[in-house]
Amino acid sequence: MLRERYEVVVILEGTIESTGQSIQARSSYIGTEILWGHRFDQVVSFRKETGEYLVNYSKFNATNEVQTPLCSARDFYEYQRILSEATKSPSFVNPPDNSTTTSSSIREGYQRSISSPDGRISVTKGTEPTAETPLLTEPPTSSTDC
C-alpha cells in the first residue's frame, strides 16, 4: 500500500439535533496524505460531574505513532500462523534471541520459503519431504515486522 496509487473517499452523514436537518461532509485523501502507523488523539471526553461531553478542538489533527505492521493484515496473519506452526514442530529450533538460527527441518507439509524479497509471505506447500529440508530463519526485528 505504501507504493500504490489510491484515493480514499470518506463520507460522513448525520443530523443536526436542534433542527433535525441532515448534513453530509465529504472528503478524499490520496496515499501521500495518509499517515500509516498513526492514530488520532482523543478529542472527545466526558465529565461525570456535569454529564457533559467536551470536544478539544486543539487536538483535532493531532496524531500519535503506534506500532503497525508494514504488511497487509492477511500477510501478517499468515506470517504469525507460519511461525506458530513452526514453533509447534518438534524439529524446529527456537532462536534464543534475535540471532539467526538454522533448524533441522519443518515437517508440517511445507517445503520452503517463508518470505520473499518484496516483503510478502510466500509458502510453498507440498508433501512430506523425504529428506530433511534445511530452513534458515531470521526472527523479526520487532513484533510488527513481517
Image (cartoon, grey):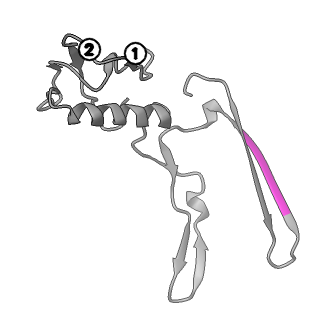
Instruction: Report the disc number at residue 77.
Output: none
Percent x, y for residue 75?
Answer: 45, 31
Residue at (42%, 23%) from the top-left corner? 121
Amino acid at circle 1: Ser
- Mark 2 residue crowding within 10 angstroms, few (<14) / some (14–19) / many (20+): some
Precedes in sequence: disc 1 or disc 2: 1
Tell me the magenta residue range.
Answer: 23-28
Between residue 133 and residue 135, name the one nearer to us.
133
Residue at (61%, 30%) from the top-left corner? 32
Q: Calculate the distance from the C-alpha at mark 1 to the C-alpha at mark 2.
A: 21 Å
Question: Hey, which residue is sitting farthest left in the picture?
Answer: 96
On screen, residue 49 above or below 39: below
User: Does 25 appear in magenta?
Assistant: yes
64 lies left or right of 43: left
Is the C terminus in the top left, top right, bottom left or bottom right quadrant? top left
123 lies left or right of 111: right
Instruction: Report the disc number at residue 116.
Output: 1
Residue at (28%, 26%) from the top-left corner? 108
Which secondary structure, mark 1?
loop
